[in-house]
Amino acid sequence: MTAPTPAAAHLAQLNVATLRHPLDDPRVAPFVEALEPVNAAADAATGFVWRLVEEGAPDATGMRPAGEDVIVNLSVWETQEALWDFAYRSGHLEVMRRRREWFERHVEAYMVLWWVPAGHLPTVDEALERLTDLRTHGPSPRAFTFASSYTAAEAAEHLPGALGAGRKVARGGAG
């Protein structure tokens, strides 16, 4: 099997956040209120491909694969630039600026990026494994950050081989 060309790769991202208070606590209400508009903006953003949502829910905040007080965000983007533009040049940035109000400060990596073949939907287990890889070994073509990024060509040998299936896909509209 030959490695996919860089044009056939998309960028996956996972970030985890440890809640200071439960999601139904009034101190977290501004974050909860921002979820729908921020997710809708992501869904409509140029270069957005997919984001994880819990079955029957508009987002993934009810999923707790990394611990009872840890929420996860897992998404796929056409390019690193598309993800960067959404994260740092949209209304998402205002929510990020307030994150210390709602989330604990992480002492280790809380966000990881990696390349996947176009059409592959990463699983939560795959994403958490990439985060563990980054935490254990530091940035590499297999698991990296915006500050220490790699191109799809550099990561080609680390692309997952199997296409994801069985996960609800949110695309466009309110998330």
Image (spheres, grey):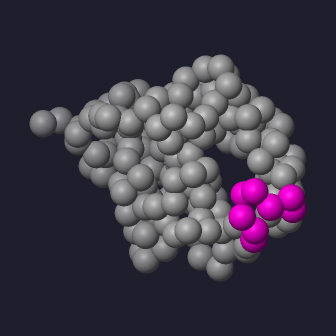
Q: Of helix, strand and loop, which mostly describes the magenta segment?
A: loop
* Residue closest to the eye, 50 or 55: 55
Tell me the residue at 38%/63% (across/down): 129
Q: Magenta stretch: residue 22 in it?
A: yes
| Residue 168 in view (yes/no) | yes
Residue 66 drawn above or below residue 159: below
Residue 61 drawn above or below residue 102: above
Tell me the residue at 65%/20% (across/down): 173
Specify whether 95 is left or right of 86. right
Q: Magenta stretch: residue 47 in it?
A: no
Corner quadrant of residue 23: bottom right
Q: Quadrant of the N terminus?
A: top left
Residue at far left of view:
1
Specify whether 63 is left or right of 173. left
Specify whether 32 is left or right of 108. right
Specify whether 137 is left or right of 4. right
| Residue 46 in view (yes/no) | no
What is the x, y in percent for residue 144? 50, 59
* Residue closest to the eye, 73 or 112: 73
What is the x, y in percent for residue 13? 53, 48
Q: What stretch is highlighted in magenta?
A: 20-27
Tell me the residue at 59%/65% (across/down): 70
Tell me the residue at 60%/40% (across/down): 59
Corner quadrant of residue 160: top left
What is the x, y in percent for residue 61? 61, 50
What is the x, y in percent for residue 71? 60, 58
Q: In which quarter of the image is the C terminus?
A: top right
Tally the marks: 0
